Amino acid sequence: MRAIPDGWRTTTLGALCREAGGDIQTGPFGSQLHASDYVAVGIPSVMPQNIGDNVISDEDIARISPADAKRLSKYLLHENDIVYSRRGDVEKRALVRAENDGWLCGTGCLRVRFGNSSACDPRFVSYFLGTQESRTWIKLHAVGATMPNLNTSILSALPVRVPEPHVQRAIADVLGALDDKIASTRHLAQISDHLAAALVCERVIEDEMILVADVASVTMGSSPPGDSYNEDGNGMVFYQGNRDFGFRSPTNRLWTVDPRRVAEAGDTLLSVRAPVGELNVANEKTCIGRGLASLRSKDELPSLLFHRLRVVPGLWDRFESGGTVFGSINGKELNSLPIPRIADGQSLEPKLAELDKIVASAEAESRTLAVLRDTLLPRLMSGELRVKDAEAVVADAV
């Protein structure tokens, strides 16, 4: 732990919980909740895969019946709890917000609760737990040779540094304002994306299929020599596959001075192995590696091409086990893949392109705000940056 700023104190997460009348508890064990107990419609059960960057995602979340929720009531989450991944990526944690109240702390998770005391602000603690020093401590103290695991004793011993409650609230308000703005911009992107998909679905001509080769030129990726890679921005940006993908926003990981297969800006990028079928759009001239294919619209309808590949349920399912080790699709299979015929695509393209611009702009703003938040976080938590100075910076951003 670094030097303690004036007015701050060092304690442990467990002691802080006890001071506030709370505790740290594991989720139910497998013997209490079986795979057969999960239902299609019911109360969400938060698993490690549902824990994002201080937020809980309900995408593909498991659910339990109201009867099981009542039976397991001691494991239900309350607003302002913090939920941790108990195994695997043990650094992952999320603040439980109002919309998550009453959800289950699922198998594989730990719940941190502070009670009703005003001695600490759970929002502040959730941000402190996201600092590099807290994440490093967790990694160093997690147990398990093959997979890191947390337990209540380890998490209780985690050192935390807290200022006076009014300072905690002020810091949480500053960082929370950025997170709220990030959430709203991402919601705008998702709504625009869903609207685009809906517009395409409306134009699908039932029982009339064409082949991918009819509307797109396919280029299968080929990785350049390993000694041509760099992280300095020298050469052409290089995407290898699925791991480089964000939500409609590839992240520049590597560059190459010897590109082999190239996608142009606006081409659809498709992951062709492990897993097959994840889609993105090249936002610049891009070298594509073995894990990707590039699809270029033959009729200058790039947005329609991107979205029509997304609207067919199960389009990629049969390729998930096509390889000897993992799923894959080759160029011949991709070219001969049947996709729906779309009515009057020419008139639809401008609408889709405008929605795609909204998505790109919102995602770019979200990334900028996230960088600002992650820059302010350690400086606020160390006392290096005054809250008033941070408030001025955030006011300009949001």
Image: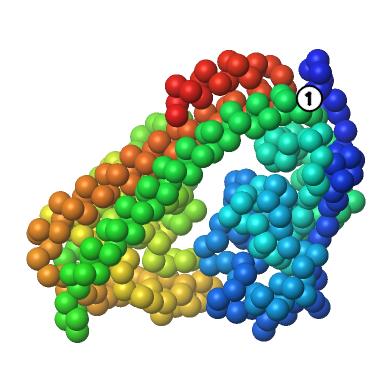
Q: Is residue 305 above or below residue 237?
A: below
Front residue of 219 and 368: 368
In this rendering, the count of numbered labels is 1
Front residue of 258 and 265: 265
Secondary structure category for the residue under label 1: loop
The N terminus, quarter of image: top right
Question: Mark 1: which amino acid?
Answer: Glu
Question: Residue 350: x and y, percent?
Answer: 15, 51
Give the residue displayed 84% in from the left and 36% down from the top. 159
The C terminus, quarter of image: top left
Q: Is residue 391 left or right of residue 188?
A: right
Q: How is the image coloured?
A: rainbow
Q: Is residue 361 left or right of residue 169?
A: left
Give the residue displayed 61% in from the left and 51% down from the top. 98
Question: Residue 356: x and y, percent?
Answer: 27, 49
- Which residue is under mark 1? 164
Give the residue displayed 18% in from the left and 70% down from the top. 203
Q: Is residue 295 above or below residue 134?
A: below
Question: Residue 18: x and y, percent?
Answer: 89, 44
- Specify whether residue 280 is in view: no
- Specify whether residue 28 is in view: yes
Q: Is residue 183 above or below residue 242?
A: above
Front residue of 65 and 384: 65
Q: Residue 28: which quarter of the image?
A: bottom right
Question: Residue 126: x and y, percent?
Answer: 70, 41
How crowded is the residue under tag 1: few (<14 C-alpha within 10 Å), some, or many (20+)? Answer: few
Give the residue displayed 44% in from the left and 43% down from the top. 184
